Image: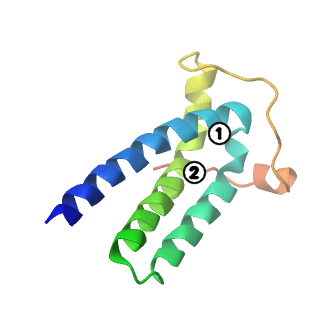
Amino acid sequence: MTFGITLGIATLFIIGAGFAWVIYAERYLGYLWWIYFMALGIALVIASLYLRADWASALLGAVGASFIWGSTELKEQSIRAKLGWFKYHEKKIDPPFVEIIKKWKAPNL
């Protein structure tokens, strides 16, 4: 009985942390890191399929889904920061293969 409630509360905190990491990741890294966050999220979701413990599998899947969602939100966060809604940091860290990633369209929901 408490499994569902506990899992729901934990997922709520994971989603809340997702909002925070998107803001800070865009501020210091930039939206071009979206592909790496998406790859991490997909890897976590796939890894969650192989865990035997239900609670660990569900939590890892929720974290993975949060990273996938966040990767699609980085571009929008970049726009919000440029509009002045959030702090904007000029010097961002370029990801590996930045020239290739710049040619791809950033995903959005």
Q: Position of residue 96 (x, y in %)?
A: 85, 54
Q: Is residue 22 above or below residue 8?
A: above
Residue plotted at (83% across, 50% down): 98
Which mark identifies residue 25?
A: 1
* Location of mark 2 (residue): 71
- Disc 2 residue crowd, few under 14, some 14–19, many 20+, Cα 10 Å: many
- Disc 1 residue crowd, few under 14, some 14–19, many 20+, Cα 10 Å: many
Q: Position of residue 69 (x, y in %)?
A: 48, 52
Q: Is residue 97 left or right of residue 6?
A: right
Q: Is residue 77 left or right of residue 57?
A: right
Type of amino acid at the residue the image marks with label 1: Ala
30 or 10: nearer the viewer: 10
Residue 82's image quarter?
top right
86 or 82: nearer the viewer: 86
Residue plotted at (78% across, 49% down): 102
Q: Is residue 73 left or right of residue 14?
A: right
Which mark identifies residue 96?
A: none
Q: CA distance from mark 2 to mark 1?
A: 10 Å
Q: Position of residue 52 (x, y in %)?
A: 41, 84
Residue with the most extreme top position: 84
How many marks on residues? 2
Residue with the most extreme left position: 1
Residue plotted at (46% across, 81% down): 51
Of the image marks 2 and 1, the number of the one nearer the N terminus: 1
Residue plotted at (40% across, 63% down): 59
Q: Position of residue 39 (x, y in %)?
A: 63, 65
Tag 1 secondary structure: helix
70 or 8: nearer the viewer: 8
